[in-house]
Image (tube, helix red, strand yellow):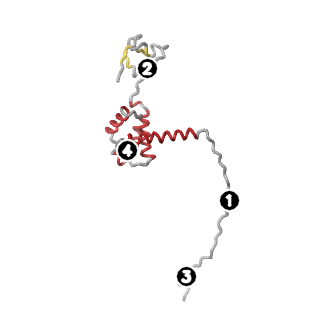
Amino acid sequence: MAHYCICPKCNIRFDRDKIQAVKISTKRYGHAICYPDNTDFVPLAKTKDQDPDYIALMNYIEKIFGDKANYAQINRQLKIYTTEKGYSYSGIMKSLIFFFEIKGNSIEKTNGAIGIVPFVYQDAYQYYLNLFLAQQANQNVTLLTQTKEVNIKPPKMRGTKQKLFDLGESEE
């Protein structure tokens, strides 16, 4: 959604979501270049296509499903998961990684969509949280490794000599 403003200093109309703007008053915005002393920057709006988590998720979905992906259904599910349920793109990707790679479930039953995400999101969250806590606990731990050298004598051939069998050529 575009937020068009007119800079009070240069009187040029601009979109504050695409060009860096500063807040001048309650409802007034200006170019950051026109007001270099003002540090009240307005954050630029990120589109879905510029979000690195979204790009990584779509690359992972393409890697998993290939040409069997149902992108219409996937985009509808992504919209529901991010707006209504409050899931993040990275959380959705990690839950898919958890379900398919860590748990080893089949991709064939998904019908080219990501409908499994609400059912495994919390389990994936717990898995990655426990993994993070284990890494934090083991971060400052040093392991003492002791090596013990064991010499093993080579085996000796025991037993009798093998007898060669006769094909009956010696009997004349």
Instruction: For mark 1, give the secondary structure.
Output: loop
Percent position of residue 130, x then y: 51, 41
Q: Residue furthest bottom?
A: 172
Question: Image quadrant for the N terminus?
Answer: top left
Q: Is mark 4 on a helix, strand or loop?
A: helix
Q: Position of residue 57 (x, y in %)?
A: 41, 37
Callout 2, which amino acid? Answer: Val
Q: Position of residue 81 (x, y in %)?
A: 37, 35
User: Viewer-proximal residue, 28 or 140?
Assistant: 140
Which numbered disc, 2 or 4, marks the residue closer to the eye? 2
User: Could you tell me how far apart the alpha carbons at marks 3 and 1 are, in whole angstroms?
Assistant: 43 Å
**Of callouts 3 and 1, the N-terminal one:** 1
Q: Which mark is residue 63?
A: none
Question: How much space separates mark 4 and mark 1, taking CA atoms?
Answer: 52 Å
Q: Which residue is labeled 4 in the image?
A: 65
Between the residue at mark 2 and the residue at mark 4, the CA separation in whole angstroms equals: 39 Å
How packed mark 3 is, by other alpha carbons closer than 10 Å (few <14, some 14-19, many 20 or more), is: few
Residue 151, label in figure: 1
Mark 4 and mark 3 lie on one chain; the one further toward the N terminus is: 4
Question: Label 1 amino acid?
Answer: Asn
Tell me which residue sits at (47%, 40%) in the image.
Answer: 126
Q: Which of marks 2 and 4 is nearer the N terminus?
A: 2
